[in-house]
Amino acid sequence: MRLGTKLTLYLSLIIILVLSGYGYLDILDRRDILMRKMKAEVRSTGQTLKVSLEKVSLPEERRNIEGLINAVSEYEGILGVIVYYPEENLIFRSRSLRDGIQPYLELIKRSIQEDRPLEEFGPYRRDPIFFLVFPLQNKGGKSIGGVAILQRTSIVEKEIAKAKGNIFLAIFVLITGTVALVLWGTRKWVTQPISKLTEGIQNVASGNLDHQIDLKRKDELSQLAGAFNQMAVDLKKAQERIIQEAETKLELERTLRHSEKLATLGQLASGLAHEIGTPLNIIYGRAELIPRKLEDREEIQKNVNTILLQTEKITKIIQQLLGMVRKKKPEYAALDMSTLLDSTLDLLDHQIQRQGISLLKEWKDNLPQVTGDPDQLQQVFLNLILNAIQSMPAGGTLRLSALSKRISREGLEESQRQYLEVCVADTGVGMKREVMQNIFNPFFTTKIMGTGLGLMVSQGIVRDHEGWIEVESEVGKGSIFRVYFPVGQGR
């Protein structure tokens, strides 16, 4: 239930209770006023009748009493009048009274005996009445009789019923008008501003930090809207600052990775110089042979083909070097891991052969593709393979394998999924436990000319590709680096 509806209901309930209570009290007050008015009128009538009857002293004059009390009984609301003279046992009553007057005769006797008036409420037959009983006295002050005046209270009830109708109508109009006013007020001053605040929150939650709430009022909700607008402005500034800091951080990471890449290429310089030098010598030798055998077209074509082949090899090596040296933003695409590993091995082929290392390649032709940046991933495997080569100065076996497997990564709630595992294993010197615990820390190295950044950069690249690296090593037996990438991971 909306807040405005709740507020309207609660306020309406309070208003209904207050006005209903007021109406009830007003009815009680009106009843009391009407009853007092009725009693006053009965007393006034009784006083007039008392004065008239006390002047009637002779028996022959009492014959006019019936006319008098019948005239009084014609007053509005008076049911009847009873006059009783106990000494003569004379009873006079209005024509409207037939039987059932005995209780009132007893009350008249009581009033004469106590010499005081009596007022009570009671029924006459089934009609509710108010009756006034008072004694009559002669000129000497002696009680000679008594009078009972019976007044219908139904006339008061009719007035009260009429008043109830008017009061209920007035209360209904007041309640309806007040509820309508409360409903309009809550919608204008509560529901609509809160709806604008809710809309603003939804806009900010969806990323629209330019949204501003316009509440031109001077109340707490307007202050809240102003605070919300300021919060949106502060959030936008914070977002822009975070984006700028993130871009700066990414640029620093690219610079760091590029620097490490250049350091790795420096280690490859001598081997690559030989790689380029050998094809150049072949080209030079074949070019010398061409002028000597101008008549042998078949031999010339053979030499030209050799020159073209060696030139293509040099071009490929130079392109690989230029591709690694060039600093660029990551470009993610679907990659064939076997092709990437082969191109990385081409750069290290000379060092592998020079150190007498046996190379074992273990992967199938139908490896699933992974999504990644080829330049960054080549840097990872270049670092890992170069470390493996350097750990076997006296030769050994370098095993490079790749296979797809389903893995449930520890610490994640997700179920098993497909990963590509690339394994770089060597039979080199291995690492102690304390060295293994620090190999991914920046500037930690066991090499004389090392930077201590290669494995840290490699781990960062792998994490950017939503993968991870696992290491096993034993001193004197070698090390195994396993790199995992999610298969088909989109970015």
Image: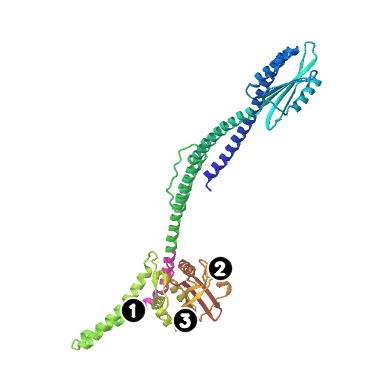
Report how far apart the C-alphas of labels 3 and 2 lie in the structure. Answer: 32 Å
Res. 269 image quadrant: bottom left
**Residue to which mark 2 is pinned:** 411
Q: Position of residue 100 (x, y in %)?
A: 73, 29
> Is label 3 in a helix, a strand or a loop?
strand
**Residue denoted by label 3:** 398
Looking at the picture, tell me which residue is in the foreground, 219 or 354.
219
Amino acid carrying label 1: it is Gly
Q: Residue furthest left?
A: 295
Q: Position of residue 204 (x, y in %)?
A: 46, 51
Callout 1–callout 3 Cβ contact below 8 Å: no
Judged by depth in the image, the label closer to the viewer, 1 or 3, is: 3
Q: Are marks 3 and 2 in contact (CB under 8 Å)?
A: no
Q: Position of residue 277 (x, y in %)?
A: 33, 79
Quadrant including the C terminus:
bottom left
Gap between marks 1 and 2, in whole Å?
51 Å
Q: Residues within 10 Å of mark 3 (few under 14, many from 20)?
A: many
Classify mark 2: helix, strand or loop.
Answer: loop
Q: Is residue 196 above or below residue 94?
A: below
Figure disc tally: 3
Labelled disc at residue 277: 1
Inspect the image, locate mark 2, and give the three-letter code of the amino acid beneath it.
Answer: Gly
| Residue 5 painted magenta | no
**Of callouts 1 and 3, which one flags the residue occurring earlier in the amino acid sequence?**
1
Of pointers 3 and 2, the one earlier in the residue sequence: 3
Asked where in the image residue 31 lies, by quadrant, the reply is: top right
Q: Badge 1: few (under 14), some or many (20 or more) residues near its Cα, within 10 Å?
A: few
CB-based contact (under 8 Å), mark 1 and mark 2? no
Rendering colour mode: rainbow
Image depth: mark 3 or mark 2 in front: 2
Where are the magenta residues, as a range?
256-277
